[in-house]
Image (cartoon, rainbow, N blue to C red):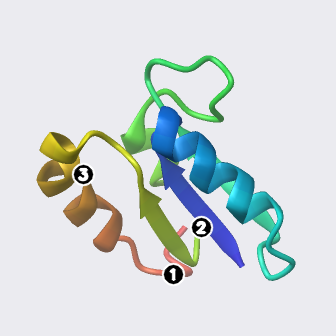
Amino acid sequence: MKVLLVGLGIMGSKHFGVLLNNPDIDSVITVDPNNSAADFSSLDKALTNKYDFAVVAVPTSLHEKVAPLTLRYEPGSS
């Protein structure tokens, strides 16, 4: 499976480690505008990639804004 991980702060980094150690995960696409180690600094650009599910690890105050954007993705659409 391919995962989109949104946010590489404290919680996002923990999720990233867990995802990397999961044998069912083939790859993790990361997005964080404040972390140069992320694959993408823009969520819009990251959403153009195919993924099976997303992990939203942004500050709680941003969940309501970010989560619906990841749900609009349709597998196989790009």
The disc placed on residue 4 is none
For the residues labelled 2 and 3, say whether their Cβ atoms are less than 8 Å apart: no
Horizontal and vertical percent position of residue 50: 59, 67
Q: In this view, does 46 lie to the left or right of 27?
A: left
Find disc 3 in the rendering and name its residue.
66
| SS at mark 1 in the image | loop
Judge by depth and name the residue closer to the eye, 39 or 5.
5
Find disc 2 in the rendering and name its residue.
50
The residues bearing labels 2 and 1 have C-alpha atoms spaced at a distance of: 6 Å
Closer to the N terminus: mark 1 or mark 3? Answer: 3
Find disc 1 in the rendering and name its residue.
75
For the residues labelled 2 and 1, say whether their Cβ atoms are less than 8 Å apart: yes
Horizontal and vertical percent position of residue 9: 48, 32
Closer to the N terminus: mark 2 or mark 1? Answer: 2
The quadrant in which the C terminus is found is bottom right
Residue 49 appears in the picture as rendered:
no
Residue at 82% x, 70% y is 26
Amino acid under disc 3:
Val
Horizontal and vertical percent position of residue 35: 55, 20
The quadrant in which the N terminus is found is bottom right
| SS at mark 2 in the image | loop
Residue at 34% x, 43% y is 58
| SS at mark 3 in the image | helix
Amino acid under disc 1:
Pro
* Residue 41 in the image: above or below residue 3: above
Amino acid under disc 2:
Lys
Closer to the N terminus: mark 2 or mark 3? Answer: 2
Judge by depth and name the residue closer to the eye, 45 or 22.
22
State which quadrant residue 33 falls in.
top left
